[in-house]
Amino acid sequence: MSADTTSPRPVAVIGGGLIGRSWAALFAASGGHDVRVWDPDEAVRAGFGARVEPLRSQLEALRPDRGGTITVADTLAAAVAGASWIQENAPESVPVKVALYREIEKAALPDTTVATSTSALLWSDLAPGFADPSRLVVAHPFNPPHLVPLVELYGIDAARLDAADAFYRELGQVPVRMKREAVGHIANRLASALYREAVNLVAEGIADVEDVDAALVNGPGLRWSVVGAHMAYHLGGGEGGIAGYLRHLGPSQERRWATLGQPQLTPDICREIIAGVERESAGRSIAQLERERDRLLIATLQAHAAIRETPP
Ligand SMILES: NC(=O)c1ccc[n+]([C@@H]2O[C@H](COP(=O)([O-])OP(=O)(O)OC[C@H]3O[C@@H](n4cnc5c(N)ncnc54)[C@H](O)[C@@H]3O)[C@@H](O)[C@H]2O)c1
């Protein structure tokens, strides 16, 4: 059951798309695991090495590469056979994942934990894919997992959750636990609440896409990369802390909540958002934008690490 990180048993990555390849780079480089990847799409399997290596190189800026190998398996059974940990990154569909789990359960060791990267599906909808549902753990990363430390955990087996906590922490990730399951877990619920209002601001003509994004990145986003929503208001309360804040500005929060929008993604709104993002992109391709995002993420992580190493 436990992810024995000193054992030579490989870690399996099932589904080698955007999230699978990022996990594979992290498992091999930061965990030193030998990784076996499988994807049903032959083109994904053939191109995997070329796509994963640049991600692995990015990690060199953060910590030494521990030298795990990455092998692409021809079959699902070959990828999961003997694996110590299985990270599932198949498309976001209950029937697809449940059918996949039935196949995994036939070929994997009976005790191996299967961790799903699902963004918004419920554990209880996916667990029926297993004869032993306790082996399923939600371990939801934030894109791109090799550069964003958050992993949200949910499951029903305390020992497996402890093993998951240890497994991801050893990679340099920061696991958080959910006390009960919820669609979108924690972070995507927060992100969705924020995105709803980001769309509403555009839909109501309050601001353009690029100004909404600039307001977020240069204001709350910068602060949230250092303190969370609750802690930010503890500091917003001055000497009185959060209790003082809630007393003084709680009613103002409630008045603002009452004005937040419930936008619909109508064709007109979608056109306006797409045009705004095109202006904001200023001709840069998605690959260029990803590179710029990753450079800044790496620099931010380096700054955080340097500060942690230097006590005040
Ligand atoms: N994209 C994100 O920002 C993000 C972030 C966190 C979690 N996730 C979750 O990760 C999972 C994968 O998302 P993604 O963005 O990597 O998608 P993706 O489309 O990039 O990759 C999915 C891969 O799964 C493969 N696949 C198709 N059928 C499969 C099957 N039956 N078994 C195994 N693999 C199969 C596809 O060929 C593809 O390569 C989803 O559950 C998603 O919710 C995505």
Image: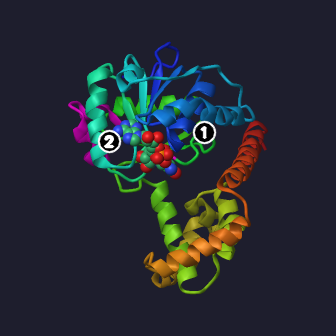
Report which quarter residue 90 is drawn in. top left
> Quarter of the picture for ligand 1?
top left
Q: Which residues are magenta?
A: 123-141
Tell me, yes or no, whether the highlighted magenta stretch contains residue 138.
yes
- On the rendered structure, is 267 left or right of 238? left
**Circles 1, 2 touching at the beta carbon (< 8 Å):** no
Position of residue 159 measured from the top left corner of the image (x, y, whole percent)? 36, 29
User: Looking at the picture, does residue 176 appear above or below residue 132?
Assistant: below
User: Looking at the picture, does residue 21 appear above or below residue 300?
Assistant: above
Q: Which residue is mark 1?
A: 146
Secondary-structure class at tag 2? helix
Tell me, yes or no, whether the highlighted magenta stretch contains residue 11.
no
- On the rendered structure, is 154 left or right of 306? left
Q: Which residue is mark 2?
A: 97
User: Is ligand 1 closer than 8 angstroms to the Cβ of mark 1?
Assistant: no
Position of residue 265 measured from the top left corner of the image (x, y, whole percent)? 45, 75
User: Looking at the picture, does residue 287 appear above or below residue 265?
Assistant: above
Q: Quadrant of the C terminus?
A: top right
Residue 256 disc label: none
Position of residue 218 measured from the top left corner of the image (x, y, whole percent)? 72, 66
Q: Which class describes the residues within 10 Å of circle 1: few (<14), some (14-19), or many (20+)?
A: many
User: Is ligand 1 closer than 8 angstroms to the Cβ of mark 2?
Assistant: yes
Q: Nearer the viewer, mark 1 or mark 2?
A: 2
- Whether residue 4 appears in this view of the structure is yes
